[in-house]
Amino acid sequence: MSSTPTFLHLAARAAGYRPSPVRDFWEVSMQPGVISLAGGNPDLTVLPLAGLGEAASRIITERGLDALQYGSGTGTGGARDAVARVMAAEGNPVDPEHVQITAGSQMALELVVKLLCDPGDVILAEGPTYVGALGVFAGMQTDVAHVAMDSDGLIPEALEEAIARLRSEGRTVKALYTIPNFHNPTGITLSAERRPRIVEICSRAGLPIIEDNPYGLLGFDGATLPSMHQLDPDNVIYLGSFSKIVAPGLRVGWAVAPEPLRRPLQLASEATTICASVLSQTLVEEYILGHDWEAVLAKARGLYRSRSAAVQEALTEHMPAGVRWSEPRGGFFTWLDLPDGVSCHAVLDAAIDAKVVFVPGTAFYTGPDMDPGVPGFSQLRLAFSLEEEDTLREGVRRLGEAIRGK
Ligand SMILES: Cc1ncc(COP(=O)(O)O)c(C=O)c1O
């Protein structure tokens, strides 16, 4: 008698996970001569690798019995102090005791959604939004309702309208997920004027805000804006990360949650990883508390500023009429609007032939991604964080030709 092995009877949530298009392009972008404007990787060449290596060696020889052991479920004291230091540098002071360390902020987002949402609940998010967040929402079987943004970020009126509409349809709206600074994928920053309005709308609607802020310290001119967490700490769950300001391979991120959520967050985190890597946390502690990390970051910001400027100039030179793009003031990304009806997938095929890759716009919206006219169909994301200026200019030139051919 044969029966289907039980491991093939996957849970319903398994179908929600889609391959990340950003990771899909990894192989293509590794081919010789291909210019990748796809992945949003930080440039690690600015890091003091010798100093970090020395610190890593010292941590193991001198503090190894702790650093290689299991650690606290909330994170090490040193890593939580490092988070407080980094948040203060952005104008967001926080009590280290309120920090929950996670293995990257991606994990923090999953834990928060796990704790807030039941299957079928709705999360509001900018349209477009971070592809990794869409993966979390799908895996947790929550639905996403996109809220429109413009060059000042999320539109408060569109948010109010979405909450009212969904509630009138009988839907349970659980949270707003937002990336206020140098948004992934558009590069847009939520204006200072809109922040209190959005905080107020969500508070009035009884809707927690999940504020995802991995890029806030990467403004090209070093300027920062007050977080929504500062404006309403009782209703905003703040997510932060060392991935873009130190190194993503460390896998250290964090959440600062309102009091009632802190203990559940710790327990959920312990159920998932027991504790984040103590070795990584200790390295973060040594780097942030012991090195001039702000000088290194200033150097990185300078690199990203010049690279973004190179992309802006090249877009002006090489894009055909009808293409529009965002003008980021920080972060890693620029967002392109193609002329109506032009398919980002067709442009991608032509671009791969011309040896340049980017992420098609549909990846950043929930729902079908190949049908003409779906959100993102005539949009795309360019990342400028990793390639040199001349390479970026050449990549944009090739992209211009690919678009012209469509
Ligand atoms: C908006 C946003 N949130 C979260 C993450 C994930 O960060 P981490 O490496 O800390 O998991 C990224 C990474 O690209 C991101 O762009």
Image (cartoon, rainbow, N blue to C red):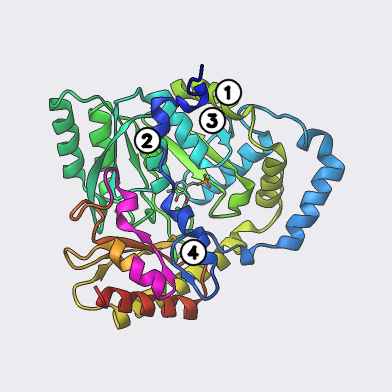
Residue 309 seen in this snapshot: yes
* Mark 1, residue position: 271
| Label 1 Cα crowd, 10 Å radius (few <14 / some 14-19 / many 20+) | few
* Mark 2, residue position: 138
* Mark 3, residue position: 98
Provide residue 52's location: percent of width, then percent of height: 73, 56
Choose the circle earlier in sequence order: 4 or 3. Answer: 4
Q: Where, by quadrant of the figure, is residue 170 drawn? A: top left
User: Which amino acid type is shown beneath numbered disc 4?
Assistant: Val
Q: Residue at x 30, y 47 (%)?
A: 365
Q: Is mark 4 within 8 Å of ligand 1?
A: no
For numbered disc 3, what is the local secondary structure? helix
Provide residue 320's location: percent of width, then percent of height: 24, 78
Provide residue 223's location: percent of width, then percent of height: 43, 60
Residue 187 seen in this snapshot: no
* Circle number at residue 28: 4
Q: Which residues are magenta?
A: 349-369
